Image: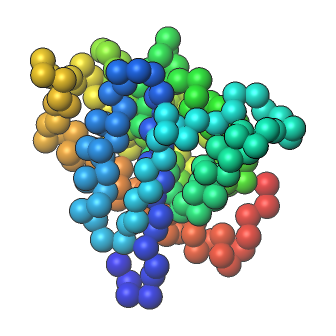
Amino acid sequence: MIASESPLTLAVIVGSTRAGRFGPTVANWFVEHAEQRAGIVVDVIDLAESPLPERLSTDLGALEAAALGAVSPRLAAADAFVVVTPEYNHSYPAPLKTAIDWHYTEWHAKPIGFVSYGGMAGGLRAVEHLRQVFTELHAVTVRETVSFHNAVSESGELTSTAASDAAAAKLIDQLLWFGRALKTARSEHPYAA
């Protein structure tokens, strides 16, 4: 990292809110990898801890506005994102879609990576749907992903391998490169959608 470069803020979004979910375990695994890298500040946004209003409306009650206010500034401050998602019914969870839909400019010209889990497909079908959605929001999805296929041990632990560790390293490399390039571009030439 060049000394004059400020660190990138990486928002790690935990997309599942179900009881008994595995998302925080997967997110914590990824955060450990990201925090080992110079030049990254991690902000974990757990949608179960910050539930957003399901109804998209400008007429919000105080609690709904407070929930939105707890998440929106953090997304706006992020230079890059990692979405941690399971696969539900060949796609991603509804609370994650709600979080995406409540925001627009927060995603513009920023890189997004994916860490997925669940079943034989390892959440990859959810990732493919998310790529289309984020492209529509003028975000840049990075090529590398981390995918856990049937990765829960009998004791409920995440089964990490050398391959998943290597995939995380590649994902972080791409997020750093795109994050720095797009941060510079946004500061020199503000993005217009």
Left or right of 102, for residue 41 = left
Q: Is residue 162 above or below residue 21?
A: below
Q: Residue at x 12, y 22 (%)?
A: 155
Which color mode does the image show? rainbow
On the image, which quarter does residue 68 sit in?
top right
Q: Nearer the viewer, residue 79 or 15?
A: 15
Q: Residue 108's x, y, as percent?
A: 67, 54
The image quadrant where one finds the N terminus is bottom left
Q: Nearer the viewer, residue 102 or 182?
A: 102
Q: Nearer the viewer, residue 154 or 179?
A: 154
Residue 51 in view here: yes
Q: Residue at x 49, y 34 (%)?
A: 48
Q: How many marks?
A: 0
The image quadrant where one finds the C terminus is bottom right
Q: Is residue 12 above or below residue 120?
A: below
Q: Nearer the viewer, residue 48 or 122?
A: 48
Q: Residue at x 63, y 71 (%)?
A: 185
Residue 177 in view here: no
Q: Is residue 145 above or below residue 190?
A: above
Left or right of 25, for residue 47 = right
Q: Residue 135's x, y, as percent?
A: 64, 41
The residue at the far right in this view is 59
Q: Residue 28's x, y, as percent?
A: 29, 44
The residue at the far top in this view is 89
On the image, which quarter does residue 124 sit in?
top left
The residue at the far front in this view is 62
Q: Residue 130's x, y, as percent?
A: 56, 32
Q: Residue at x 43, y 73 (%)?
A: 7
